[in-house]
Amino acid sequence: MVSKRLSREAGHRRKFLTIVDDTPECQRAVAYASRRAKNTSGVVVLLYVIEPDDFQHWLGVEQIMREEAAEAARSTLDGYASKVRETLGIEPELVVREGKRTEEIHRLIEEDQDIAILVIAAGSSKEGPGPLVSSIAGKGAAFPIPVTVLPQNLSEEELDELA
């Protein structure tokens, strides 16, 4: 069962969730979600999910690899947060999770009932719209909130106008 969204209740603010990863389209999703948050007096939530498969087969060094992955995640999030602060003057919420991406997105949405919209951006590569859009489009990934997918051909000005 889906929990009621609280973003319209007194004392709550609508949150725009976006996923931070190493894809080029990630920057556009963060920029749009941040602008929407600022323009609507909301909050942008930046989520970085560490996939556990990356270090399960390295038994002896698993803990070290896990710590390095967490540090890299925090560093990446800090970079995006700094840019949001500098360009828009708002403070993003930063979240690091470990697990399967769609499961962790679902879990965070369930835990934080102020999250009202998931913002992702499509990639422009020949392989398709990108790993995040592809995983979100799967049947098992249906989310209890609206998902905004930014087309890859929008300019910065168009993103700004839409936000």
Image (cartoon, rainbow, N blue to C red):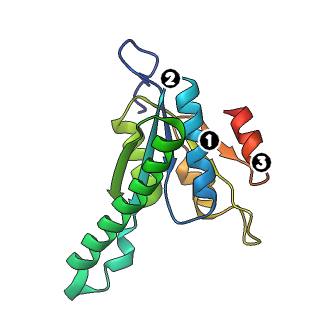
Tag 1 and tag 3, C-beta contact below 8 Å: no
Place of residue 2 in the rendered image (x, y in percent of width and height, measured from the top left): 43, 32
Residue 69 vertical placement versus 45 (above, below): below
Closer to the N terminus: mark 1 or mark 2? 1
At label 2, counting other C-alpha atoms closer than 10 Å, the crowd grade (few under 14, some 14-19, many 20 or more) is: few
* Residue corresponding to mark 3: 154
Residue 63 position within the rendered picture, expressed as x and y whole percent measured from the top left:
21, 76
**Where is 69 relative to 162, above or below?**
below
- Residue 52 visible within the image: yes
Q: Quadrant of the C terminus?
A: top right
At x 38%, y 74%, the residue is 53
Q: Residue furthest top?
A: 10
Q: Is residue 104 left or right of residue 149?
A: left
Under mark 1, the amino acid is Tyr
Report the amino acid beneath label 2.
Ser
Q: Do the residues labelled 3 and 2 touch (CB within 8 Å)?
A: no
Q: Which mark is residue 48?
A: none
Query: Which residue has dot 1 on it?
Result: 32
**What is the three-letter code of the residue carrying label 3?**
Leu
Distance (Cα) linking label 3 and label 2:
24 Å
Question: Which residue is denoted by mark 2 in the rendering?
Answer: 41
Q: Is mark 1 on a helix, strand or loop?
A: helix
Callout 3: SS: loop
Does the image show residue 99? no
